[in-house]
Amino acid sequence: MGESGVVIVEYWLASYLGRAWLWLHKDLRPKLGELPGLCALVAHGNSLEAGQLWRAQDFAVRVWWRFGMTAIVLVLPIIGIGAAMRPGRVGTDIGSYIMLGLGALTGVALAQMGLLRYRADRTRFYLARAGWQAGGQPLPPGAAGLPRRADFWLMALIAVAAFAILLFAATRSAQP
C-alpha cells in the first residue's frame, strides 16, 4: 500500500490528463480505460506488478506528449489572432507572454515525457531480461524503472532553467 501524503506528481497529472484525453477520444476507452487508474495508483506510491507499471509508464509518456503538443498547438491561434487583429503594443506583449508561457509549458511536458520514457524503457528492459513472466512481480528495490518522487521537480527545474537561458539569450541578442 502507498505511503500517506506521498504523491508522484507526473503520474498524478497523467491520471487526470489521461482521463480528459479518454473522455475526448471515446473509442480508446475500451483499450486504455484502466490506465488512468493505474497512473493514480503509482502516483500515490502503490507498488504495482512490473507489467502493470510498464503499462502505466507508457500511458503517462503518451499523455505528457499529447499535453505538450496541445500547448504548442495553442500558439497557432494566438499568432493568427495577432496577425488578423493587429492589437498594438499592449496586445502584442500579452500575446507574446501567452506564447512564452505555452512554450515553457511545452518544455516542461516534454521533459517529463523524456524521463518517463527512460523509466518505462528501464522497466521494459527488466521485463525482457528477466522474462515476461516476471511481469507479475514488482520491480526489485532500486531498479532504474521505479518512479521517484523527485523526478517531476527535477525535470521541471531543468526545463524551466533551459527556457530561462534561451529567453535571456534571445532578449540579450535583440538589444542594441
Image (cartoon, grey):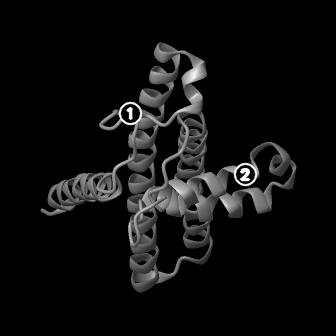
Residue 100 to residue 46: above or below: below
Q: Residues within 10 Å of mark 1 (few under 14, many from 20)?
A: few
Front residue of this view, candidates 123 and 139? 139
Identity of the residue drawn at 59% across and 19% down? 132
Q: Position of residue 13 (x, y in %)?
A: 52, 63
Identity of the residue drawn at 40% across and 85% down? 90
Decide if residue 76 is on the left or right side of residue 175.
right
The residue indicated by pointer 2 is 34
Distance (Cα) linking label 2 and label 1: 24 Å
Q: Position of residue 140 (x, y in %)?
A: 38, 33
For residue 174, what is the image quadrant?
bottom left
Q: Position of residue 34 (x, y in %)?
A: 72, 51
As drawn, the label of residue 140 is 1
Front residue of this view, candidates 42 and 153? 42
Residue 137 to residue 164: above or below: above
Three-letter code for the amino acid on which mark 2 is drawn: Glu
Three-letter code for the amino acid on which mark 1 is drawn: Pro
